[in-house]
């Protein structure tokens, strides 16, 4: 049904196979077209690229290390495990890459007001940070349920001078924050840039956000070749909207022997409303500007989701992931809340690294998969963020005094 | 009921050089085309209701009362869980309707009942995902059978609408698209060419909901749209009282009122239909008095 309704030629910009596109109220179309034009110009502009790269290096702290997790490797007794340390970046997650890029674009477009949505608060913090850096006005929408569970990040955003607006509708999580940000954008589109935080939304966002994060994979590929002289057998990353995953996957797409594994939130069960595993229960549909897999009911109403990690708690997934799943170039699995908590503790105790609960899902998959792999094989896990923001939830759940 | 395609002086043929996919099989509306007739008394009143709020039976009564009160076209709002183009009033109504379990098929079933009793234009007003789940082709078949005249999909722009337009045209259903103050002329041209029935001009950059003043640039938008089409132009978003209705009615062929009606429904439990009928009548009589005072 939806396939035939939305069939497009392969080469249409903003399409990933059947997925992607631009499904927004007409009011936003001019702004999306402007953003697309401006981004096309900027990415060919040497000055823009040099400034972006300078900020990634001097402000965000790139390149991030690729660290050999020797004790975890030994404990699991299989593949040699490397961790891509995006958690070491300024503000504590990969999100800053995209925020720097989009803020530079907003300045080029003369837009002085920035709005953003946030789930776990990492994108909100990164947005508030770049707005402070460039002197831009910043409004962040956040579901009140997420504000409760990521309270520390709410405070950080406010400390950085951003206005955090709580969203009470729906499940009061990321999806509802995006709805509210889109409503703000429709209303203030002439002077406002919507700094979308994942590879979601209408074209050009999925492509542009991917490009800004693709530095993760370029670094990782060069680093592993330098350290080992060969490519990894597998790369594992968690997938909410999917920005850190596509960021590390992209450079390896043409290396067909490198398995790409995305880990969704398996939550607390298999029923609609208990998880955020779009490839386990979702169907193609349109949500918030893009055509992709969507958790929904028989009438096309968007399903509720659950995950212990606010950053993965979202009913749709970036359209490029949908295409990668259909073509089987990437494989998508899920890790449960419990598995993520265990993985978080385990990495903390074997390597002295507390990963964000989002990234802990990727670690959980590594724990399952590495023992079944050969010792001669290499696996890279993208540690997309650090767990400081999750200390409250970890304390609630881990009962370690 | 079948609509016969025939020659028309009302609707112009699409020009062959449009930027979007052509639909050569699009029949040209005849003068007895219902939406065209709905715009005979100007300005036509386009009334929006969220179907299933407070429940589908009451919605049917509200619609019939609105028609009795003088509404020319009814927009049948299909509730959606994530209405990004809607303000708080329609968001709340959608939540109430979804709690009742209202689905697109309920809306179409009710439309068929309404069609037995009124000749007002009926336009399904929806977000794309419920229609995709329902099935585009199935929607066209069922909507035509129910006596619905067309649809407006809030988050479907002309670029993505090729297949939708073909399917709708094959069933003689009108496709109404939004035109926004931010749309440059090039987009307005494509929108005007993709529209059948009428063009829906969004009065301001923003979401649905009442506001104190009508946006200043909406008249300019209507003028720009008219450069590209002879179709009627209806203006909506933010129009909530007789004064604004009359003001917009001076330059638009139709005026859409939504949130104000939905709010009345919210505030008048048990007597929704009477409240809406009285309000609609008031909007229409405001026009009459404005017309009298002008002449």
Image (cartoon, rainbow, N blue to C red):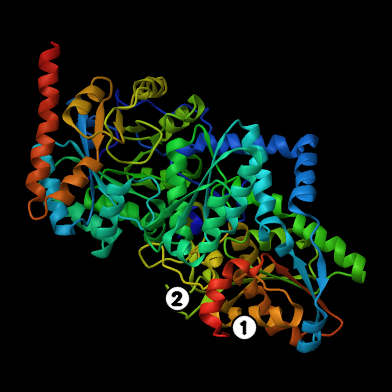
Residue in front for this viewpoint, A119 or A369 = A119
**Element assignment for label 1:** helix
| Crowd tier of the residue under label 1, counting other residues whose Cα lies within 10 Å: few below 14, some 14–19, many 20 or above | some
In the rendered view, would you say A377 is above or below A205? below
Quarter-of-image position of residue A85: bottom right
Task: Tell me the subunit letter for badge 2.
Answer: A
Q: Residue at x 42, y 54 (%)?
A: A166
Q: Disc 1 marks which residue?
A: A342
**Element assignment for label 2:** loop
Q: Residue at x 59, y 66 (%)?
A: A389
> Is residue B168 something one can see in this rendering?
yes
Residue in front for this viewpoint, A48 or A86 = A86
> Is residue B115 something one can see in this rendering?
no
Q: Residue at x 54, y 62 (%)?
A: A152
Residue A203, position as x, y percentages in the image: 58, 46
In the rendered view, would you say A259 is above or below A31? below
């Amino acid at each position: 049904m939806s396939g035939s309704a939305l069939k497009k030629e392969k080469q249409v910009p903003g399409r990933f196979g059947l997925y992607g596109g631009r499904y927004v109220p007409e009011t936003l179309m001019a702004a999306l077209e402007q953003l697309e034009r401006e981004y096309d110009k900027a990415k060919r502009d040497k000055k823009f690229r040099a400034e972006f790269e300078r900020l990634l290096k001097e402000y965000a702290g790139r390149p991030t290390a690729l660290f050999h997790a020797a004790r975890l490797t030994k404990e699991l007794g299989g593949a040699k495990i490397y961790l891509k340390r995006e958690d070491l970046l300024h503000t504590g997650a990969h999100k800053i890459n995209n925020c720097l890029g989009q803020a530079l674009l907003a300045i080029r477009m003369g837009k002085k007001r920035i709005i953003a949505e946030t789930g776990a608060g990492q994108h909100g913090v990164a947005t508030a940070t770049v707005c402070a850096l460039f002197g831009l006005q910043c409004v962040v929408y956040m579901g009140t349920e997420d504000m409760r569970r990521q309270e520390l990040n709410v405070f950080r955003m406010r400390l950085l001078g951003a206005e955090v607006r709580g969203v009470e509708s729906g499940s009061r999580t990321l999806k509802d924050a995006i709805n509210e940000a889109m409503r703000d954008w429709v209303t203030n589109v002439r002077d406002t840039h919507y700094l979308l935080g994942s590879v979601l939304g209408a074209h050009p966002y999925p492509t542009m956000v991917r490009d800004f994060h693709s530095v993760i994979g370029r670094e990782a590929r060069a680093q592993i070749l330098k350290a080992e002289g060969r490519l990894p057998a597998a790369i594992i990353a968690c997938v909410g909207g999917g920005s850190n995953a596509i960021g590390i996957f992209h450079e390896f797409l043409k290396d067909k022997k490198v398995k790409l594994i995305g880990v969704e939130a398996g939550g607390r069960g298999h029923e609609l409303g208990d998880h955020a595993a779009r490839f386990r229960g979702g169907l193609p549909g349109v949500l918030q500007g893009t055509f992709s897999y969507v958790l929904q009911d028989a009438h096309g109403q968007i399903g509720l989701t659950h995950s212990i990690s606010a950053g993965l708690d979202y009913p749709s997934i970036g359209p490029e992931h949908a295409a990668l799943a259909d073509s089987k170039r990437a494989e998508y699995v899920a890790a449960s809340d419990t598995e993520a908590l265990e993985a978080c503790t385990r990495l903390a105790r074997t390597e002295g690294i507390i990963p964000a609960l989002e990234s802990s899902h990727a670690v959980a998959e590594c724990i399952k998969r590495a023992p079944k792999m050969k010792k001669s094989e290499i696996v890279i896990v993208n540690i997309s963020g650090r767990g400081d923001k999750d200390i409250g939830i970890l304390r609630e759940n881990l009962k370690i005094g | 009921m079948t609509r016969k395609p025939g020659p028309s002086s009302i609707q112009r043929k699409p020009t062959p050089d449009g930027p979007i996919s052509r639909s050569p099989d699009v029949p040209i509306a005849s003068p007895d085309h219902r939406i065209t007739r709905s715009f005979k008394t100007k300005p036509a009143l386009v009334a929006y209701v969220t179907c299933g709020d407070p429940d589908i039976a009451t919605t049917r009564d509200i619609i019939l009362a609105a028609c009795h009160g003088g509404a020319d076209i009814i927009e049948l709002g299909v509730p959606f869980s994530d209405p990004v183009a809607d303000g708080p009033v329609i968001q709340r109504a959608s939540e109430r309707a979804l709690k009742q379990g209202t689905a697109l098929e309920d809306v179409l079933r009710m439309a068929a009942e309404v069609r037995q009793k009124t000749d007002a234009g009926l336009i399904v007003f929806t977000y794309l995902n419920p229609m995709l789940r329902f099935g585009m082709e199935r929607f066209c078949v069922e909507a035509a059978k129910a006596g619905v005249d067309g649809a407006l999909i809030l988050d479907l722009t002309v670029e993505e609408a090729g297949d939708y337009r073909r399917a709708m045209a094959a069933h003689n259903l009108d496709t109404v698209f939004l035109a926004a103050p931010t749309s440059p002329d090039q987009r307005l041209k494509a929108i005007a060419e993709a529209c059948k029935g009428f063009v829906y001009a969004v009065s301001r950059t923003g979401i649905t909901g009442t506001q104190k003043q009508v946006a200043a640039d909406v008249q300019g938008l209507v003028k720009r749209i008219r450069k590209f089409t002879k179709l009627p132009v209806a203006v909506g978003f933010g129009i909530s009282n007789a004064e604004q209705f009359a003001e917009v009615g001076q330059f638009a062929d139709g005026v859409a009122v939504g949130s104000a009606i939905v709010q009345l429904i919210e505030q008048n439990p048990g007597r929704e239909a009477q409240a809406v009928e009285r309000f609609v009548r008031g909007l229409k009589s405001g026009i009459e008095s404005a017309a009298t005072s002008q002449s």
